[in-house]
Image (spheres, rainbow, N blue to C red):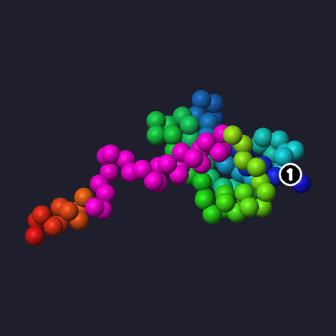
Amino acid sequence: MAVRIRLKRIGKRKQSYFRIIVVDQKTKRDGSIIDDLGYYQPWRKTKNCFVNKEKYEEWLKKGAVPSLTVKNIYKVILKKEVVPSFGSVSEEKVDHQEDLKS
């Protein structure tokens, strides 16, 4: 049984979002699933996405092949965690500000 990690379309017209799922390769796009790994909302300005990394890595070890889109979404999620955004306050800044106050 060839297993794929791919997207399942959910939502209404012009506001669709996708579930990142594990399915048999021969299953239809919106057919039955083996496991649910996360979601992706491309129509939002922030393009919300979430993937359960533990399950994703586990399925890769079992031999599941991710689609190109799912691979790219996973890379974006990893980049978000490594590189902090400019608008957020990091712990180092907070510690430095506390040192200045005392």
Which residue appears at 15% of the width and 67% of the height? Answer: 99
Q: Is residue 45 visible?
A: yes
Q: Residue at x 59, y 29 (%)?
A: 14
The quarter in which the C terminus is drawn is bottom left
Residue at image position (31%, 46%) is: 87
101 drawn magenta? no
Q: Which residue is mark 1?
A: 2
Q: Residues within 10 Å of mark 1 (few under 14, many from 20)?
A: few
- The answer to which image quadrant residue 71 occupies is top right
Q: Which residue sits at x=29%, y=54%?
A: 89
* Residue 18 seen: no
Name the secondary structure under disc 1.
loop
**Residue 36 in the figure: left or right of residue 34:** left
Q: Is residue 43 left or right of residue 23?
A: left
Q: 9 or 47, which lies in front?
A: 47
Q: Choose between 66 and 16: the one closer to the eye.
A: 66
Disc 1 marks which amino acid?
Answer: Ala
Residue 87 drawn in magenta: yes
Range shown magenta: 69-92
Q: Position of residue 34 (x, y in %)?
A: 78, 57
